[in-house]
Structures are given as structure tokens and as C-alpha cells.
Image (cartoon, rainbow, N blue to C red):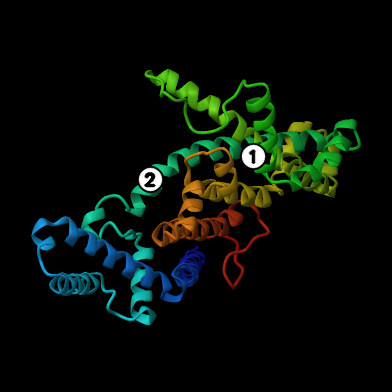
Amino acid sequence: MREVINRLGRYAVVRAVFLFLAVIVAIYITVMIANMGGKLDEIRKSEISQQVGMQILANPEYRQLPPDERLKLQEALVAQEFRRLGMDQPFFPKRSFQYLSSALTLRLGWAEHMASDAGSRQVRLIVLERLPTTLLLFGTANLTLFFLSVFVALFLSRRYGSFLDRLTIGLAPSSAAPGWFYGLFLILIFAATLRVLPWGGLVDAPVPDTSLGYALSVLKHMILPTTAVILGALFATIYSWRTFFLIYSSEDYVELARAKGLPSRSVELRYVLRPTLPPILTNFLLVLITMWMGQIVLETVFRWPGLGRAYYLAIQLQDTPVIIGVTVIFGYLLAATVYVLDFMYAVIDPRVRVGAAGRRA
């Protein structure tokens, strides 16, 4: 028993170290790409110089100075600001590793460095502001999609060859289109033509006064984007899991369980559903990760104020801190999910062994 615990401990530590190193490498590459090899630093330097010049012109005492003295004062203040921000150092390697350290600890945003813009560009605040709306929309949509797909796939695996089974197979290619594609048609039908649902957004304008009215307004705005997400993946997911259930339902041990007279529900839960838990669990956890990121195009189509739309606006505005911050969160979640899955596989699947020696957990 002690040997098994030691092996699990060593495996857990080594696995965590390698995953963290992978996250560091991925984030560093993201930092280099997002900064375009240091070109964005040059853009920031120009913005700082312009901002300092505007502050000098806005000060009545400085406006009375001769142009040459104002220019010297501006150059001195800009140089002082560059030294304070560390921008007088070369981008590679020093500033790139400073960016990496800030990204890993989520100490991002220009607001913490620029007094005139204090409090408005903190990445933590942006993420915390947009995250609840993304979780609300995609949490509802993806969890509904997950459980609906599992139950329908189990139902169809018991009725192989039926009309509903053939219909699902025929509709599976429809999931090749993304959710936002169906969203455009839903908006056209229910918002533009029938005018029964809103075009997009989070809540009605003006905002309802009561909490109940606010909640009902949000639910009304969630109908179309939630339906679009579900329609974009429903039939392909059902078809995929129905295939898994059919494969395992034809195993010899399942036939033996049925021959023993076990109830159909017990056979499905113990001998069909449990062997398929690893891929189902993987899909479920990866769905939870993508739920944090949102969907950029779908949130843009429905004007949903979530992380996906914030990411899209950050790309348009070349807002490097926001781009890196959202990417860092996704990297941490992905690494943590892979780490947890390694041990959950060993718990739910007796064929999985942990560690190089291959002992059962």
C-alpha cells in the first residue's frame, strides 16, 4: 500500500511539473505573438509620449513655457515614465520575461502603471465583469446539451434501426455548421420577422426595476443564443455517443448480464454507461473549459457581453493584456483538467494504470 501511495505521489508531482512547464511555454509564445516581437511596445511608447504632451498642454503653467522648454520637459517626463515602466530595457529577453511573469500571476493591464488611466484597464476586473455572463449563457447551453445528448443517445442505442435512429443519423451532418450560423436564422425568424424575441444583448432597455423583472428579461435574451449553441452540436453529439453505447452494448459481458435476467436499466448503467464514462467525462470537462472562454463569433452576433466578445474587441484594439489574460486563464484551466482527468480515469476505468510501473490506483 505504501508503495502504491509513493508511486501515486511521484506521478502526481511529475505530472504537475510537466503540465506547468507546458503552460509556461505556451504563455511565453502567446506573449511573443501578442506583442509582435516588441512592436506593440513601440506603439505604447508613442501613446505615452502623446499622452504626456497632452498633459503638458492641459497644464496652464506649462503652456506659458517656450516651445523648446516644453519639448525638453516632455522628453524628460517621457523618459521618466519609460524608466518607471521598465520600457527603457530591450524587449528580448528582459521585458519578454517580465511580461511572462506578469501573465503567470495575472498582474496585467496598463492601468497599474499609468496614473491617468488608473482603474480602467485592469485585466482582473475585465475578466470578473465578463465571466458571469459567459458562464450563465454557455453553462446553461452546454450543460443542457450534455445531459440531453447522453439520455437521447442511450434511448436510441436501445432502438437501433428505428425511424428516430435513422433520422438522427441523417441530421448529424447539420452539426457541421457552427452555432452562430443557426443564430443568424433564429434572429431572422424570431426577432426580425415574428418580433417575439429580442435581437441580442443581455437585458431590455430600460433595465427593469425589480429583480424578478431583470431575471425574466435576461432569460428572454438567453433563448436564442442558447438554442443556437444546442442546435450547432446536438445531432453530432448524439450520433457520436450513440455509437459508443452501441459498441459497448454488443460486448459479451453485456450479453451475459442480460442472460442472467438483470433489468435493462441496470445493464445500461453498470455495463454500457460505465465503460463509456472516460470519453464522456473528457467531453464534459472540455465543455466546461470552453464555457469559460465563450464563443467569440456567437457572442458578437448576439451582442452578448461575455469573455468572447471582450476577446474579440481586445484583438481589434490590439489590447495585449486582455488577450494574454484570457489565454492564461484558459491555459490554467486546460492543464488542471488534464491533470484531474488522469486520476479520474484510474478511478472509473479499471483498465487504466497510473505511473510508468503501471500499478492500479
Q: Give me the residue at 33% from left, 58% from top.
A: 109
Q: Is residue 346 left or right of residue 130?
A: right
Locate residue 307 relative to residue 123 in the image: left or right.
right
Camera-side residue of 279 and 261:
279
Residue 8 place in picture, x, y as percent: 50, 65
Q: Is residue 101 above or below residue 349?
A: below
Residue flagged by tag 1: what amino acid is it?
A: Val
Name the residue carrying label 2. 128
| Closer to the camera in the image, 354 or 145 | 145
Q: Position of residue 272 (x, y in %)?
A: 75, 43
Looking at the picture, how far across and down is residue 37, in whole percent? 45, 76
Is any atom of residue 79 visible in this view?
yes
- Residue 298 lies left or right of residue 315; in this view the side is right
**In percent of the image, x 57 and y 37: which residue is there?**
302
* Quadrant including the C terminus: bottom right
Residue at figure coordinates x 86%, y 40% from the top left: 170
Q: Which mark is residue 229?
A: 1
Label 2: state its secondary structure. helix
Residue name at image x 38 percent, y 18 percent: 210
Check disc 1: other Cα within 10 Å, few if <14, some if 14-19, many if 20+. Answer: many
Of callouts 1 and 2, the N-terminal one? 2
Is residue 186 depicted above or below 178 in this figure?
above
Q: Where on the picture, by quarter, is residue 193?
A: top right
Amino acid beneath label 2 = Leu
